[in-house]
Amino acid sequence: MSDLFVELKTPNGKTYKQPRGLFINNEFVKSKSGETISSTNPSDESEITTVYAAGPEDVHVAVAAARKAFKDPSWRDLDSTARGAILFKFAELIEQHRETLAAIETWDNGKPFSVSLNDDLGEVIGTIKYYAGYADKIHGQVIETSPAKLAYTIREPLGVCAQIIPWNFPLAMAAWKLGPALATGNTVVMKAAEQTPLSILYLATLVKDAGFPPGVINILNGEGRKAGAALAQHLDVDKIAFTGSTATGKEIMKMAAVNMKNITLETGGKSPLVVFDDADLDQAVKWAHVGIMYNQGQVCTATSRILVQEGVYDKFIEGFKKHVSETSVVGDPFKDDTFQGPQVTKTQFERVLSYIDAGKKEGATLVAGGEAYKNVGGKGFFVSPTIFTNVKDDMKIYREEVFGPFVVISSFKTEEEAIQRANDTTYGLGAAVFTQDITKGHRLARLIEAGMVWINSSNDSDIRVPFGGVKQSGIGRELGEAGLEAYTNKKAVHVNLGNRL
């Protein structure tokens, strides 16, 4: 076996060949510099393996491969139904390798294996199939003007698309971006998160077998400040799509201005969950738990600010605390009963703990958690599910995104107050409203400033429905038919049928 692959065995017994290289032109290659980055198992802090890290030179090679593929007839002139068939084949191959991909995702990321296998991989396969079905259904239109003119539009691919995926849902976020980009005929250079490069590299082993021509999909490992920055600034990249923090999104937006790249940004959030007196409290408690504690709280749309009307405030806290203690089982992500694994890295672990300290210092009431969770052997980046109550709107823990199993709860009196406080944030990704009054639910859905609102649920997303934010939570939409808009240009064609000068 070459230096570009290493045989590994996952904690649940899956033996497989892990690629270590950069995937360019349907082949794995070493980085020009020979530099590597290490991938760590967050459950026990041990090194899993190292992978080659791309620098600007490697980015240039990958972009050139993507440009060549974009212009090559094997992809450019491919019948749209045939393009869809390649995507369907890709989804089938992912299904065949589902258990291995899920095991790698859990090992590298820390999320429970049941979540990787059922939720994440289910979403990956579903998203690729969804956009495979759209490949031959992307239409322009004829626009009626006058008998002397035929005017019509063509939906054309943008070209070379750079895509930067996050570490919290590596494979799912890759699918969200690959699906619409490929269905519309673009080529891709994707950068994996440096914290979680392993699962997307294994996915790359399926690209050639699916039938994609060389250069259509290129996958790079590398640090954001090197490989990510080189992609954002590259003059031969036509579009950049990014999922990650708001601060990084702003930097990418600045760098992308160099050639006015088309951009899609899905960034941070501090989403409110509003519970009214008339809510089904049992359901509100259960959904609120999912809304913040799922995936170790490492979800951009997490409903991390809970606002409860004062009539049910004490009762909600009592029920929520009880449900969290019974349901949020922390431990080995490969065990069936585990709900919460470790945070993805030591950096993220320490970040969550720093916010716990801030909450205590600011005078909020800690009612659950608030410390590192001691796993067997004392290793791993585990944090106990943490609940703060009596939180004031000017507190750091109320205003800033923590990205962990960490929730703040506050009470409100009136509907007007709830709307004002829900909107008092620089973010606008998601929001949840719990009420049995359907008129009130629809009214708040319009008045809350967010890209998505859930009525009587939380984080109940669907691959067929647009996903994205307003304000500093991002630009553009992913998923659903709207996801295709981000990867096509509308070209107008004017045909003179009789105008004479």
Image (spheres, grey):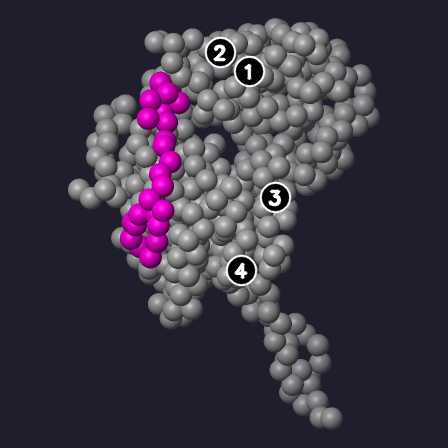
Q: Are marks 4 and 2 in contact (CB under 8 Å)?
A: no
Q: CA distance from mark 1 to mark 4?
A: 41 Å
Local secondary structure at mark 3: helix
* Residue annotated with mark 1: 353
Binning the other alpha carbons within 10 Å of mark 2 as few (below 14), some (14 to 19) or many (20 upward) gives some
Q: Nearer the viewer, residue 62 or 214?
A: 62
Q: What's the magenta region? A: 24-47
Q: Earlier in the sequence, mark 3 or mark 4?
A: 4
* Residue annotated with mark 4: 235
Q: Nearer the viewer, residue 84 or 426?
A: 426
Q: Are marks 1 and 2 in contact (CB under 8 Å)?
A: yes
Q: Amino acid at mark 3?
A: Glu
Q: CA distance from mark 3 to mark 4?
A: 16 Å
Q: Is residue 376 visible?
A: yes
Q: Amino acid at mark 1?
A: Leu
Binning the other alpha carbons within 10 Å of mark 4 as few (below 14), some (14 to 19) or many (20 upward) gives some
Local secondary structure at mark 4: loop
Q: Residue furthest bottom?
A: 501
Local secondary structure at mark 1: helix
